[in-house]
Image (cartoon, rainbow, N blue to C red):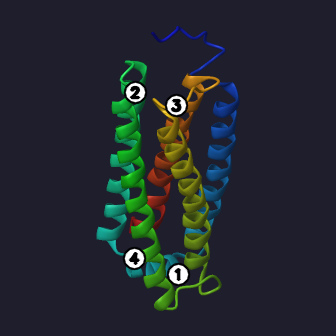
Amino acid sequence: MRRSRALEEPPGGVLLWLIVALELLTFAMVFGVIAHQRTGSPQAFAEGQASLSLPMGLALTLALVTSGALAAQAVHHFREERRRSSRRWFLASAGVGAVFVVLKVVDSLNHLHAGHRLGTSDFWDAYWMGTGFHFLHVLVGLGLLLGVAARVDRAKFTDEETAVAGSALFWHMCDVAWFFLFPLFFAR
């Protein structure tokens, strides 16, 4: 059965919450730079945004949100001692997260083929910086989800709650960051 945790020992552990807080602070600085560039170069942003596909942006958002919901289910099943089911939820979450990766790679290749590269405009500099930084976090998050899925019901964790809830926490941080990136780039 799941043990109760003290306030100073949050799900995922204090260290992971500090890491997530620092990452979100870093993302906030990136968002600030993007917002500054957006107000300083309205024409470049208008032209860049016209090149973005809203359906692709919505598909990326749907993939991340769905994957996050699946990761939350994985944590709930784990806490209910339903380990095999938890592993399947983590694998499903990682699978849908992989859909995000594939969509983002396709989207990025389309932009590169259209000549939208770093140095093209303030918009594309901001776009590649913001979405690239986010993409790296998504890759780390996928690694965490797959790592937990590989061990659930097969190997013991030193601290189960930290491994399981912490991986989902990091994945949800990717969702939160995207919720800011999406309107910064796609809102016209």
Percent x, y for residue 157? 60, 27
**Which of marks 1 and 4 precedes in the sequence?**
1
C-alpha span from label 3 to label 4: 36 Å
Quarter-of-image position of residue 85: top left
**Nearer the camera: disc 2 or disc 1:** 2
Q: The N terminus appears in which quarter of the rendering?
A: top left
Amino acid type for the residue under numbered disc 1: Ala
Where is mark 3, residue-wise?
Answer: 164
Name the element at disc 4. loop
In the rendering, which numbered label is found on residue 44?
1
Relative depth, front residue between 79 and 38: 79
Amino acid type for the residue under numbered disc 2: Arg
Name the element at disc 3. helix
Q: Residue at x 36, y 54 (%)?
A: 96
The count of marks equals 4
Cβ atoms at labels 4 and 1 below 8 Å apart: no
Judged from this view, the residue extending furthest toward the left is 55
Cβ atoms at labels 2 and 4 below 8 Å apart: no
Where is mark 2, residue-wise?
Answer: 83
Cβ atoms at labels 2 and 3 below 8 Å apart: no
Name the element at disc 2. helix
Within 10 Å of the Cα at label 4, are there few (<14), some (14-19), or many (20+) other Cα atoms? some
Amino acid type for the residue under numbered disc 3: Val
**Nearer the camera: disc 4 or disc 1:** 4
